[in-house]
Image (cartoon, grey):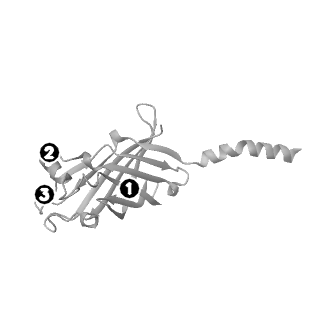
Amino acid sequence: MKTFTRALLFAALLPFAFAAQAADHYTLDPAHTSVGWEISHFGFSHPSGKFALIDGTLSLDAVHPENSTVSATIPIANLVTGIPKLDEHLKSKDFFDVATFPTATFASTKVDVQGNDSAIVHGTLTLHGVSKPVDLNVRLNKIGENMMKKPTAGFSATATIKRSDFGMKTYLPALGDEIKLTIESESNIQ
């Protein structure tokens, strides 16, 4: 009888055990997620801009963070520098060619945990029709409830890419090839 009772108890608790181990699924908050960039302008200055209204998902495994994943879609048409003529030029065929390549995507492939609040997130960035591996240096800022009482995870990340790797070679080498990326993101459980 004891064996049967234990088996029944185990069967009843099994779904809860798996739920406790399962990852939490978040949606990137487009109002609080952006990708900033900076480039050398012929060595004179380092202009910057950002992409906003990013869409994506995050699967965050707090017990085994190396099993976490993230994917994002970046609408290139939402590029903003604060200079409308420059925005127009960057969206043209000389650079992003928004008419042909309206979005960029990032999908993680592996997470290497570096400490309690940091990791290197390896993934594939598809930009301007070209897919290349990119590593994000990610810092977990906070997990908790936001002001709307929604469970929220906040991250900051950095990376460096070469625009020539993605087929954007206008004004090389005078206009910088290396692009510094700074990512800020909040994700919410819906």
Counting from the top left corner in percent of width and height, residue 96 is at 23, 56
**Depth check: 153 or 28 in front?**
28
Count of labels in the image: 3
- Residue with the mark numbered 2: 84
Counting from the top left corner in percent of width and height, residue 178 is at 23, 64
Is 131 positioned to the left or the right of 59 in the image?
A: left
Kindly report which numbered mark, 1 or 3, lies closer to the viewer in this rendering.
1
Is 61 positioned to the left or the right of 36 in the image?
A: right
Q: Determine the residue positioned at 80% across, 47% down.
A: 7
Q: Determine the residue positioned at 38% across, 55% down.
A: 106
Where residue 187 sits, quadrant-wise, is top left
- Residue with the mark numbered 1: 106
Is 175 positioned to the left or the right of 138 in the image?
A: left
Image height check: is 145 above or below 86? above
Mark 2 is surrounded, within 10 Å at the Cα level, by few (under 14), some (14 to 19) or many (20 or more) other residues, namely few
Residue 125 visible somewhere in the drawing:
yes
Which numbered dot is residue 45?
3
Dot 2 or dot 3, earlier in sequence: 3
Callout 1: helix, strand or loop?
strand
Identified by mark 3, the residue type is Ser
Kindly report which numbered mark, 2 or 3, lies closer to the viewer in this rendering.
2
Identified by mark 2, the residue type is Pro
Identified by mark 1, the residue type is Phe
Where residue 171 sits, quadrant-wise, is bottom left
Dot 1 or dot 2, earlier in sequence: 2
Spatial CA span between label 1 and label 3: 28 Å
Which numbered dot is residue 172?
none
Residue 83 visible somewhere in the drawing:
no
Q: Determine the residue positioned at 13% across, 59% down.
A: 41
